[in-house]
Amino acid sequence: MTRSDSRRTDAGRSRRTGADRSGRTGAGRSRRQRVVGLLGTPFGLAVLACLVLAGWAVWSGGALDGPIARHVRTSSFYADPGLDVDRAAAERIIGNRRLVVVLRSPDADLRDTCKQVHRAADGTVVLVLSRDGDDYDTYGCALVPGYEKKNLGKAAAAEMIIGRGIDTFTDRPLEAVKVIAVNYDRLVKAGTVPDGSRTISPSLPRFLLAVAAVLGVVAAATALYLGGRRAGRLAAARRVRRDELTDSRSALSAATAGLAQQIIDLDPRYALLNARRDGDDSGFVRRYRQLTSDHAALLDRLATVDGTDDAAVRALTTRVESLSRQAQALADRKSAPASP
């Protein structure tokens, strides 16, 4: 290969490579444009809103919570696996109080446990405890409303009082839970923590998703109903137009057949007058020839007319009727105006 050939080959390869790259770039850009265009439509915006609601529901519903937080989100008592305690009985003792008790294994990080249940047990008084020899190691976190601002002092008092007197029952955790429940009732009577029962309800995004699902079903059913009615009306209108067109074509066919028969009936008279040596003084031959010429043009028009064009079919029917009147005039030996 010569040097010039190699240069031409390299130039061709570079041009093809550039074209391929530009083609891929254009394809990628067009895909991005389609995605952006879809997101800009009402459907795309609705999909984005549903995705945001779904993400919010997953996050607020505790999908990212640890095992302790997931448990206390719907329960008032938690105990680490392996601890000998009747968990159902402990829950019955606490009842519907705004109180959560978390019993951890010895040497567990109680402060970190309080952080884990911060969102799951919001609005309650949480006491995290673990056995430390003959006593309980406790860590309280009062998650009552305003505990970080105006009720900070009350929250601190609740955290100190809620665990009093439980060290006597290190071997009997259910008795310790009873003491904690009594301490909570004293805090309520003193106005340190707000009164009321703990309510566990789905998060707001779940309600919104449920409402969105109901509205979506209703909107889809309504759209299907309205679309079905519209489709029915359109189908009925098409059927009426089709029936009318069928009637118009039938009338045109019948009129054309009648005109042909009239021309056939006039043919013997035309042959007789045309054979005379002195010609035809009445002008019958001339008008008959014009009639047959117009009839031939009409047949050509019939061969090319669109069967769905109702206006054209009606116009041809009118034309056939006009020629039929001319033929009848010839048959009655009456003069007729020249055909248009």
Image (cartoon, rainbow, N blue to C red):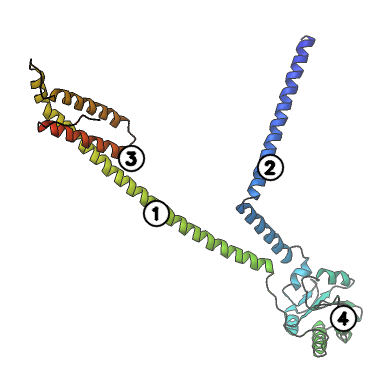
* Amino acid of disc 4: Glu
In this figure, what is the number of numbered marks?
4
Give the answer, above or below, for where 70 lies relative to 8. Answer: below
Judge by depth and name the residue closer to the eye, 100 or 89.
Answer: 100
The numbered mark, 2 or 1, whose residue comes first in the sequence reads: 2
Quadrant location of the C terminus in the rendered image:
top left
Which residue is tagged 4? 159
- Residue at 32% over, 45% down: 242
Q: Nearer the viewer, mark 4 or mark 3?
A: 3
* Amino acid of disc 3: Ala
Dot 3 and dot 1 residues touching (CB under 8 Å): no
Q: Which mark is residue 233?
A: 1
Q: CA distance from mark 4 to mark 2?
A: 56 Å
The numbered mark, 1 or 4, whose residue comes first in the sequence reads: 4
Dot 2 and dot 1 residues touching (CB under 8 Å): no
Q: Which mark is residue 32?
A: 2
Q: Nearer the viewer, mark 4 or mark 2?
A: 2
Residue 274 x, y percent position in the rendering? 11, 19
Q: Which mark is residue 311?
A: 3
Q: CA distance from mark 2 to mark 1?
A: 40 Å
Q: Nearer the viewer, mark 3 or mark 1?
A: 3
Dot 4 and dot 2 residues touching (CB under 8 Å): no
Residue 14 x, y percent position in the rendering? 75, 22
Dot 4 and dot 3 residues touching (CB under 8 Å): no
The numbered mark, 4 or 2, whose residue comes first in the sequence reads: 2
